[in-house]
Image (tube, coloured by chain):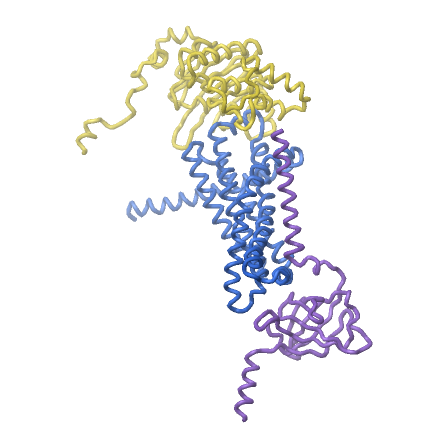
Amino acid sequence: MNWTGFIFVASIGRWAIELTHGLGRAGLFLGEVFLQFDVLFRRPRLLIQQLYSVGVLTVLIIILSGFFVGMVLGLQGYNTLVGFGAESSLGLAVAKLLTRELGPVLTALLFTGRAGSALTAEIGLMKATEQIAALEMMAVNPVRRIIASRFFAAVLSVPLLTAMFCVVGVFGGHLVGVEMLGVDNGVFWSSMQQGVDLYDDIFGGLIKSLVFGFFIGWIALNQGYFCQPNSAGISRATTATVVTSSLAVFSLNYCLTALMFSA
Amino acid sequence: MTFLHLKDIEFSFPGKKLFEELDLSVWKGQITVIMGPSGCGKSSLLSMIGGRLVPSAGSIEFDGELVKPADKKKLYCQRRKMGMLFQSSALLTDLSVFENVAFPVREHTDLPEDIIRLIVLIKLEMVGLRGAANLMPSELSGGMARRVALARAIALDPDLVMYDEPFTGLDPISMGVIVKLIRELNDALNLTSIVVTHDIVEGCSIADYIYIVGNRNLIGHGTVEQLTDSNDPLVKQFMAGLPDGPVAYHYPASPFENELSRS
Amino acid sequence: MKTKLSELFVGVFLLAGVVSVAFLAMNVGNLDSESSGESYRVSASFDNIGGLNAKSPVTLAGVRIGRVTSIQVDRDRFNAVVNMTISSAYNNLPLDTSASILTSGLLGSQYIGLDPGGDIEVLQEGSVIDITQSAIVLENLISKFLFSQAEK
């Protein structure tokens, strides 16, 4: 085999080793976060602070996006359904799309962009300015003090944000469908209530969003905690968070949909 | 009395061996200065003492007990007896000066608020920054931030304080303040201090004992007088700050003629 | 003061999240018909169920009173057995009630419509509805129509 071929194969090998190493490290990291679970009950204030910066500050973008998504669903849904004379099912179409797919997925993507990247940058900067090392030298476990609360805040926030997204979206669809295009108000709601299933659609969607929150929190904090502690490293880690989280959300969404809704 | 003993330390970063069979002792109550060229691993030495890096061979004995990073519980107990001042100060950016100094006290004790307040104000008074208690870290100059970090490092009354490049990047006045503080705190609080620096003048002005690190091992050690009188060419070059000598001015390279003729 | 305000916001955030979930459950989903508890099971056989599936509604005079739980094929008689639950509030349906598979709208989803008879005895847990009418399959309808045209 010639020399470039050799280098090529070796680089594949190194890539695989680094990937395995990274995955193993991320797994151990997650395990350590879970070992610090009790910090939630011992020091709830830490969680509250993070719920504020991770959850509350994301509400506005979620509500605005949810409203516009709901409105466009109302418009497009109406235009499509009216061709079959089935505009009475508009409420059902809007609600089912929102609760099953668009709510969880779009909320997760917005959360990644708004909160996930911020988490990575924050932790990465703490590492670059030796704050994490300082915590360790003060005999404070940084995973316990700064990582665990952020992780659980993310896991808790995403389902709540998803629920808000869906509710606002339904009202957005209502605004366009009922107020502007003249679908009957009662038909809008009753078709929704008849067709949307509490367990399959609503709880299924919320379970999805819980899983998304879990993975986004994990990816974002892992990227920040193990980034190269300089500006190039932090920017790389932030990009990696957004890219990896988004891909994870899309692929997990398919897997979860296949698992939950196919049976 | 030996307070800290590093024995046969061997340590390497990927692709670079930093230390081989390094032996180093620190006596109780003294200020030990570790000097050496940039990038020779002085800071890594402090990280090893703090148990954040693990030497590939050798042992570290701190106050009669081995530092073993695998034993997390014991390591955290040992770290509570150490204080560390980082080069970047490493203040927690979302907490005020007061809260930064109070941080280790709050984390490790259940003292009532008025006693914590007293402790913090005493420590801040020691570094002359009691008036800055309510400022945020972003409002401090580099020298002030380092003094706050010093107050934080001594908040729990440690036995050992480690200074990582305490003189770097300071104006002459702030430098003088830090030099004075290291000496005063060491004597007043009955501390043992380790100062890592490459500033020869300031290092010599406070040192009880000096180690010069380089070439993967000690170049020389002794009191200030012993080292200035030394005949060892390496020690001489370092103490006088000569650009060329046993440590070559040129980074190792092929002869320049060869490189020129190649193009 | 600053921490107090952020804590208030967090409280509002959590409440809004819970209210949203509750709103989805009550107004968007079908929590009320789902959770009304007590119900009894009956079954019915059809020659053809068309597009009926599990969870399709069971209605009486157009009002939803239950839902289809499962659909199986009877291996001996080669027809479909549909199991359904009916809310116990309607435990006075006569035994000779008939069940037909109907379509909501021209192309809408299919559901079971119950048509009460006049028997004194009533349907109860495990009863079988004997009188059934299968789904109307459009293709069959068209072919019947074509045959009748051809015979003329």
Q: Nearer the viewer, residue A97 or B64?
A: A97
What shade does chain B have?
Answer: yellow
Q: Nearer the viewer, residue B220 or B175?
A: B175
Q: Nearer the viewer, residue B64 or B101?
A: B101
The residue depicted at 57 percent of the width and 72 percent of the height is C107
Q: Residue furthest bottom?
A: C152
Residue A14 location, quadrant: top left
* Residue A259 appears in the rendering: no
Instruction: Give x and y (percent) for residue C116.
Output: 75, 75
* Residue A134 appears in the rendering: yes
Residue B238 location, quadrant: top left
Instruction: Give x and y (percent) for residue B2.
Output: 54, 14
**Is A153 situated left or right of C69 in this image?**
left
Instruction: Give x and y (percent) for residue A5.
Output: 31, 48
Q: Nearer the viewer, residue B211 or A134?
A: A134
The chain painted purple is: C
The chain painted blue is: A
Is A261 situated above or below B219? below
**Is B21 situated left or right of A103 in this image?**
left
**Is C3 situated left or right of A20 in this image?**
right
Q: Quadrant of the C terminus of chain A?
A: bottom right
